[in-house]
Amino acid sequence: NHCIDLHMDKIFEGHSGDGTHIRGVPLAFAKLLFCYHKKNNDPKITSIITGYHGNNTLKNGMISFLKDEFGLEFTEDKFNSGMIVLSKSAH
């Protein structure tokens, strides 16, 4: 499955947050992580779990970044507001 999860506990071992809600990584880090995966591991990323807290900063920031930098159209998943999915190919 070609998915990146941007929650802190999925990226950093031993990160448990404050027990109530797991934070997402900062937007700048999320952008770097996407670029790393695209270049090295998984050029066919089709979904990104952004979470839906924090005024959607991470979700909206990633949608804009992916469109501007890669021409990729990501939209909010219709069943999970904390996930964005690739809606059409960039080719």
Image: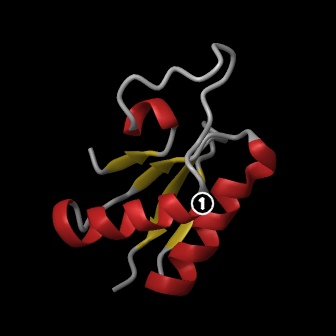
Q: Is 20 rendered above or below residue 49?
A: above
Q: Residue at 48% across / 66% down in the picture?
A: 31
Residue highlighted by disc 1:
27
Q: Residue at 63% across / 45% down in the picture?
A: 78
Would residue 75 be seen by someone viewing this image from the given angle? Answer: no
Q: What x and y, as percent, mark residue 12?
A: 39, 35
Residue 7 vs residue 57: left or right? left
Q: Residue at 26% across / 44% down in the picture?
A: 1
Q: Furthest residue to the right?
A: 55
Q: Furthest residue to the top?
A: 19
Q: What x and y, as percent, mark residue 85?
A: 49, 55
Residue 8 vs residue 60: left or right? left
Residue 3 vs residue 40: left or right? right
Q: How crowded is mark 1: few (under 14 residues within 10 Å), some or many (20 or more)?
A: some
Q: In which quarter of the image is the C terminus?
A: bottom left
Q: Label 1 is placed on what type of residue?
A: Leu
Would residue 72 be seen by someone viewing this image from the given angle? Answer: yes
Q: Is 31 rendered above or below residue 82?
A: below
